[in-house]
Image (cartoon, helix red, strand yellow):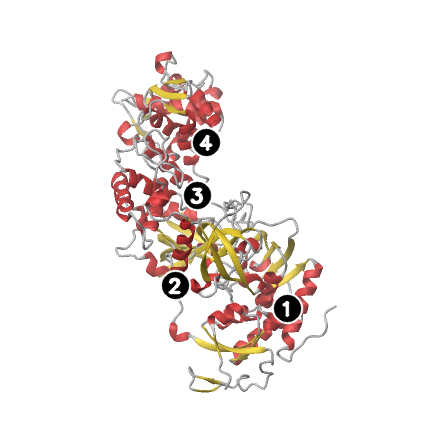
Amino acid sequence: MSRRRLERLLNLTMCLMATSRFLTVSEIGDMVEGYEPGHDDDAHEAFRRMFERDKQYLRDLGIPLETGQDGYGDEVGYRIRRDDYALPEIRLSPDEAAALALAARLWSTASLAAPAASALRKLSAGGAATSPGLGTRATGDGTAPGPGPAELFGLDGLEPRVDAAEPAFEPCLAALQERRAIRFPYRKPGEPEAADRLVEPWGVLSWRGRWYLAGHDRRRGAPRVFRLSRVAGPVRPVGPAGAVTVPAGVDLRSMVTMSTSSSPDRVRTATLAVRVGAGHALRRRGRPLPADGSDAATRGPVTPAAGDGQPGAGSDMDVLRIGFVDPERMARWVAGYGADVVVLGPPDLRAEVVRRLSAVAGEGPSAGVAPDTLGGPAGDGPVPSTAGDLTGRDPAGRRRPDGTGPDRSAVGRARQDSPSDDRLSRLLALVPWLRARPGVSVDAAAAAFGITARQLRDDLELLFLCGLPGGAPGDLIDISYEGGQITVVDPQTLDRPLRLTVDEATALVVAARALADLPGLAGREALEQAVTRIERAIGSRPADQVGVQLDPPNEVLTLLQRALRDGRRVHLRYLVWSRDELTERDVDPMRLLSLDGHWYLEGWCHRAEATRMFRLDSIVGGAAGVTVLAAAASPPPTAAVRDLSAGVFTPGPGDLLAIVDLAAAARWAADHYPVETADELPGGGLRVTLYATGTAWLRRLLLGLGGDARVVGPPALVTEIHAAAGKALAGYDAAPPPVG
């Protein structure tokens, strides 16, 4: 936004707050510095268009412009009632303020992080001792450090993070706030075309790192749950605001968990031959078959080939029994191991694995067919829970749809980025914040607002020029700025911060509610009391319609947090999922964070001699796979935690860039894996490009997808994938002709 427009918007805001009567558009044009109504029709029309844009911008910012008429005139006028503008007094204790500062750090994407930070600024401008930082708590003037929010609440070293990168999130949230129905195209797994949905939204919930919309599907006449990453186009509002009523007693968590859970009575058992030293994730899930061939679970002998006449386990293989529900998902997982795993039974699972491997090797019916005509089973679900060392480019670090991930250009946002994070919002909060802290230093004020000292000085210079109509010295904002200390002498009408917008209150309250659900949280009462005060001030409970379910701390997390607090090195027995490799590592912990529904340890790995991230559920044996050593943790001075704002995965200069065509049934892979670009193909398919350090995990992905994926390039990767499929088929006595 230009400096000139900023001055005009500030002048307009102060002018409309200073009047008790309604000012007409003509009066505003004559009174507010920055407008030039002119005397001819063209100039006056240009002025009116400018005013309409400014008026809408202020309303989008949450400034309540009231429309009305005075008794002596017929023309509509505008004013801002100070009681409607100003944030009600919210008295927060230091611990309550610290709790909110901690909660605001939950969001890792700007769509929620910016409103949460703006809410903190407004509360701080109203007198609360909040700080945007995590780990330091400011006192009244923002200069004296105290115990940080994380330490106060027993979360020191822990950083729970939640993103909301799905393009459908913001328009769904807007519809919830406006109580409007929405229409959107939705693609179910395995379906080539997206179906149109008309939904009355009841709430959105983050569950295991994914966002879901719960509501009433009008065309099906029943409640439904939709995963937002499967929304295949723009979300459009339908009908008037206020038309949707959420039924009493709606439980978002129950709706989402029921829609994503499997029925226990559908569990079946697979018998697998697994090569010694391989299939570690399968071994964690399964149980070995005794040497005598008996199985206590079935109370009798087991025939390895299940009577189908196919070859059984080789001499270098172990036989495992493992439970599964979805045969297609299980086939995808097993086929990814190539020649290291052979299905011995049941026959339908074995046949499905052979079909997938044959399609990749070039024998299946899908071979060589463009993705828009590919058939095959549906497959949608997360990677196995043993994703690996993410700095080693493992698949769990999916990219974001902001230019660093899948191209979502076909999916439009219903709302543009909120102006609540821009400079005007900061200026409106800065004046009352400075007034409440006379003599605060430039550096302290800049740190409290998350800007540089130079940016703060630019803000002060702009404020010097703004004020009430008249433009005389007594009409301008008066700020004393001497010796690096700032004092607001006359704020004009900006002595109170603007009230919280719905987005700001939602971002802050939902984050606080999510933290309050963590078991073992210290100071929970302060967090809940802070939320109660905000909800009372805004007159609503936004967390009833928006929720976040964090992975609760477990024994492994507690053990590592204690090591982090004590500054101790740890030894890990760790499965690198991408390479199917068990490793032993000594690690100096640096932080623990939650991303995409999973907890990670980031630290200096002595084995790799570099900073690495480790997913906690890939530690073999749980807490037994962690040994706290007597040695002190001592990361080198060059070690630093990574900036994860663009996702976990960061390609290196030597990484392979692969091109893969995905059928509609395999579109989910673009959400789960480190995709760089994604272009639509006919029939609902995608052409994706993705980087990989080595080809092990990519080979496993493509073998598992079978005919639902086709490698386009580079040629060496095409040859490697086909050869791996042929080698795997040899274990089923169905080897294809040699490739090349």
- Identify the disc placed on residue 360: 1
Q: Is residue 343 above or below residue 455?
A: below
Q: Which residue is mark 3?
A: 111
| First in residue order: circle 1 vs circle 3 | 3
**Residue highlighted by disc 2:** 259
Q: Dot 1: what SS? A: helix
Q: Hey, which quadrant is residue 536 in on the image?
A: top left
Mark 3 touching mark 4, by CB under 8 A?
A: no
Circle on res. 226: none
**Cα–Cα gap, marks 3 and 2:** 26 Å
Q: State which mark lies toward you, 4 or 2.
A: 4
User: Dot 1: few (<14), some (14–19), or many (≥20) neighbours within 10 Å?
Assistant: many
- The picture places residue 70, in percent across and down from the top left corner, at 27, 23
| Residue at which label 4 appears | 451
Amino acid type at circle 2 is Ser
Measured Cα–Cα span from mark 3 to mark 4: 19 Å
Mark 1: which amino acid? Val
At horizontal 56% and vertical 61% (from top left) the residue drawn is: 578
Residues at discs 3 and 2 in contact (Cβ within 8 Å): no
Which is in the foreground here, disc 3 or disc 4? 4
Q: CA distance from mark 1 to mark 3?
A: 40 Å
Which comes before the other along the chain, label 3 or label 2? 3
